């Protein structure tokens, strides 16, 4: 298995631009999570899906952030408009609810908003 | 909601010595406690986990202990090696379904040769 695949690995964008981060979970996993990692706040859960349905989006910082999961093999996290304070590493992770093991994380997308 | 604290924030040990990282959690309903290792430029990787019905678990040089009464759990690494140098995160289950985790702030472990 190729693991959780995220793209792009790095993204540099100007303030005000739209940014889309992408994630392909491990095949067969029915949970998908989006986390944000910063030095100040550590690993923060933004949103998670079960069977493509958003379960908890209370961690999404504001309306500028949105996430979708149109099918079991693809999810996006969109920021529109982006701001410098959105600069962080964004991780996607997936897990199998039936096995109740820990997550498998992707390699992350390092976002820099200038 | 769940709150996870982790200590120390940084830890330096000599190669071959042991390292211990401690975490506390607040939600007595939490029942699963994974530990993750994050190397530079990579995502966190699960290294060991423990469930609330178990007090200790070992995997080669790594062990985790859990004290449900005190609501704390610890990671023990013996015979440390330079490749153990990384940031380690503890986590505890949270939420109504116990599927999402709250992570501790992390411990940066440096193993000095």
Image (cartoon, coloured by chain):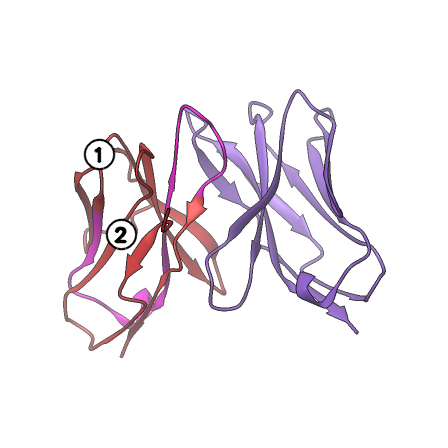
Chain colours: A red, B purple
Q: Are marks 2 and 1 on the same chain?
A: yes
* Image side of residue A18 versus residue B9, left or right: left
Of labels 2 and 1, earlier in sequence is: 2
Say few, some or many: other residues with alpha carbon within 10 Å of mark 1 (under 14 / 14 to 19 / 20 or more): some
Is B112 in front, or is B70? B112
The residue wearing badge 2 is A23
**Chain of the residue where label 2 is placed in the rendered structure:** A
In which quadrant will I find the C terminus of chain B?
Answer: bottom right
Please report, as a chain letter, where disc 1 is located.
Answer: A
- Place of residue B26 in the rendered image (x, y in percent of width and height, measured from the top left): 60, 33
Query: Residue placed farthest to the top in the image?
Result: B53
Q: Is A99 one of the magenta-colored residues?
A: yes
Label for residue B106?
none
Residue at x-position 47% and y-position 28%:
A100
Tell me: residue A45, above or below residue A81.
Answer: above
Give the camera-side residue of B40 and A49.
Answer: B40
Across and down, in percent, residue A53 comes to: 21, 32
In the current view of this chain or complex, which residue is farthest to the front?
Answer: A1
Whole-number angstrom distance, CA of label 2 to CA of label 1: 13 Å
Question: Please, is residue B29 above or below residue B35 in the view?
Answer: above
In the rendering, at what x and y percent does residue B12 appear?
A: 76, 67
* Residue A56, horizontal then vertical, whole percent: 31, 35
Q: Is residue B3 above or below residue A9?
A: above
Tag 2, which secondary structure? strand
- Secondary structure beneath dot 1 equals loop
The residue at which mark 1 appears reads as: A52
- Report the side of A56 relative to A41 (left or right): left
Image check: A47 left or right of B39? left
The magenta segment is: A75-103
Residue at (70% x, 35% y) in the render: B72
């Amino acid at each position: 298995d190729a693991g959780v695949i995220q793209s792009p690995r790095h993204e540099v964008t100007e303030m005000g631009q739209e940014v889309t981060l992408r994630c392909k979970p491990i095949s067969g996993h029915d949970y998908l999570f989006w986390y944000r990692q910063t030095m100040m706040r550590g690993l923060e859960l933004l949103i998670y899906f079960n069977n493509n349905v958003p379960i908890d989006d209370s961690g999404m910082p504001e309306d500028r952030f949105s996430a979708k999961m149109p099918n079991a093999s693809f999810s996006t996290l969109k920021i529109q408009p982006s701001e410098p304070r959105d600069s962080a590493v964004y991780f996607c992770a997936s897990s199998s609810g039936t096995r109740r093991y820990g997550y498998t994380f992707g390699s992350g997308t390092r976002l820099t908003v200038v | 909601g769940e709150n996870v604290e982790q200590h120390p924030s940084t830890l330096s040990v000599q190669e071959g010595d042991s390292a211990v990282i401690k975490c506390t959690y607040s939600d007595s309903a939490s029942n699963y406690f994974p530990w993750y290792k994050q190397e530079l430029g990579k995502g966190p990787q699960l290294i060991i986990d423990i469930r609330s019905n178990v007090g200790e678990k070992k995997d080669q040089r790594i062990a985790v202990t859990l004290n449900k009464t005190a609501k704390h759990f610890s990671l023990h690494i013996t015979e440390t090696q330079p490749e153990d140098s990384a940031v380690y995160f503890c986590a505890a289950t949270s939420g109504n379904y116990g599927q999402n985790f709250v992570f501790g702030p992390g411990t940066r472990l440096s193993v000095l040769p």
